[in-house]
Image (cartoon, rainbow, N blue to C red):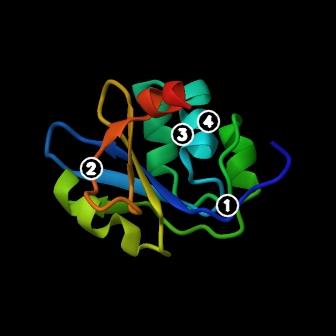
Amino acid sequence: RNTFMGTSSMIGIYNSEDGTVQASYCHYDGYVDGNGATLLSAYNSQYDAEIVANGGYLSGLTNDYLESRVNSVHDDKASRYSSIEQYLNMGGNINGAEYLYLWDGVCWMVASLYEKVVKFVKVEMILTKA
């Protein structure tokens, strides 16, 4: 992708040991066809999910994490939430994030804050419907 859209998101990872979520803000391409597709294609493992979720602010997410970090205009740290519930309720408070992504230890999930009932669904399911 050469152009980015101003749809923000949080990209998080669930810690099964203590129930917390660690998440990083991403300013551009937060919609499922953008960051959701990139997370599935380039960061679809525990290791890669940890790198993105723990790495802090991203202007945009590309298939190359190092490139994404270098091109980011801020260096805000990742945010920590005490539970998935808190992440769902408060994740959008960071710079108005519109989509919340969560690596649950197996796959990427997403919650759109545009929905009446905000809940996580598998990213892959949404992309295969399109």
| Residue 100 % position (x, y) | 41, 54
- Distance (Cα) linking label 3 and label 2: 15 Å
| Of pointers 1 and 2, the one earlier in the residue sequence | 1
Q: Give the residue displayed 18% in from the left and 57% down from the top.
A: 85
Q: Are marks 3 and 2 in contact (CB under 8 Å)?
A: no
Give amino acid for label 4. Thr
- Density class for disc 3 (Cα within 10 Å; few <14, some 14-19, many ≥20) is many
| Of pointers 3 and 1, the one earlier in the residue sequence | 3
Q: Residue under label 1, please give it.
A: 59
Q: Residue under label 4, please give it.
A: 38
Q: Residue under label 3, please give it.
A: 36
| Of pointers 3 and 2, the one earlier in the residue sequence | 3
Q: Are marks 3 and 4 in contact (CB under 8 Å)?
A: yes
Which residue is nearer to you in this view: 104 or 55? 104
Quadrant containing the C terminus in the rendered view:
top right
What secondary structure is found at the residue carrying circle 3? helix
- Density class for disc 4 (Cα within 10 Å; few <14, some 14-19, many ≥20) is some
Give amino acid for label 2. Lys
- Distance (Cα) linking label 3 and label 1: 15 Å
Which residue is nearer to you in this view: 33 or 11? 33
What secondary structure is found at the residue carrying circle 1? loop
